[in-house]
């Protein structure tokens, strides 16, 4: 009984302060949904918006394609397995790569690992910051720790790569 009285007091104090919807908006479900969510649609996802745009290889490289240019790096799983990266060997700008061709290497305090191109294309840029600070790969492997940028010659190769959900499942199969 006391709970019911408390709820009545609360609802009496809160409801008059809520903004009113215009009469037109009440009639359209989409407008009502936007109003309830504060003006933007709500979504529920277990992965970040950034990582949903990534495609992964079974060698733990990722690629994000924007405007025909692919940015390539290694996954969080790979950088954790390597440990502190101390050296990064990258290709020259202009080098042509085939899908799954070795293009460089990373060395860490634990091990060394080859890098493989996720797609066919030509290197257009390398992350020069990594020569002075290879630890960026450990600190921010999906943003500041990217390795190369490349043109994408065969966009259909993207279909052979894993999205975030498939990559997560792949990682679990390794454990």
Image: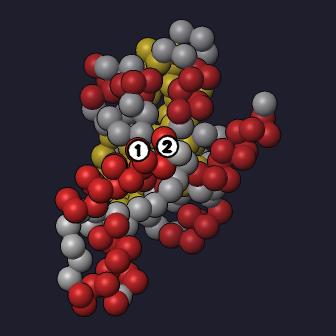
**Residue, x 28% and y 61% (percent of image)?**
15
Instruction: Where is residue 78? Give x, y as percent.
Output: 58, 30
Q: Is residue 75 above or below residue 56?
A: above
Contact (Cβ within 8 Å) of mark 2 with mark 1: yes
Is residue 159 something one can see in this rendering? yes
**Residue, x 58% and y 51% (percent of image)?**
164
Instruction: Where is residue 112? Give x, y as percent.
Output: 59, 20
- Dot 1, how many residues are within 10 Å of its Cα: few (below 14), some (14-19), or many (20+)? few
User: What numbered label is drawn on residue 3?
Assistant: 2
Residue that lies at the very extreme toward the top in this rendered image: 109
Residue that lies at the very extreme toward the front in this rendered image: 1
Q: Is residue 153 above or below residue 113?
A: below
Residue 122, by quadrant, is: bottom left
> Secondary structure under badge 1?
helix
Pick the front one: 32 or 117:
32
**Residue, x 28% and y 19% (percent of image)?**
132
Q: Is residue 39 above or below residue 22?
A: above
Q: CA distance from mark 2 to mark 1?
A: 5 Å
User: What numbered label is drawn on residue 6?
Assistant: 1
Q: Is residue 172 above or below residue 157?
A: above
> Secondary structure under badge 2?
helix
**Residue, x 39% and y 19% (percent of image)?**
135
């Amino acid at each position: 009984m006391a709970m019911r009285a408390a709820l009545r007091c609360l609802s009496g104090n809160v409801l008059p302060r809520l903004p009113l919807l215009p009469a037109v908006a009440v009639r359209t479900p989409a407008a009502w949904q936007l109003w309830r969510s504060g003006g933007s649609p709500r979504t529920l996802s277990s992965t970040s918006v950034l990582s949903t745009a990534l495609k992964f290889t079974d060698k733990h490289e990722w690629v994000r394609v924007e405007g025909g240019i692919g940015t390539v790096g290694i996954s969080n799983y790979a950088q954790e397995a390597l440990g502190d990266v101390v050296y990064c060997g990258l290709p020259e700008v202009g080098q042509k790569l085939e899908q799954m061709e070795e293009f460089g290497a990373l060395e860490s305090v634990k091990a060394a690992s080859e890098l493989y191109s996720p797609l066919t294309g030509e290197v257009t840029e390398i992350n020069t910051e990594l020569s002075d600070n290879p630890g960026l790969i450990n600190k921010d492997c999906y943003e500041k720790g990217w390795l190369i940028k490349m043109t994408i010659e065969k966009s259909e190769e993207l279909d052979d790569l894993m999205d975030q959900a498939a990559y997560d499942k792949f990682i679990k199969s390794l454990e």
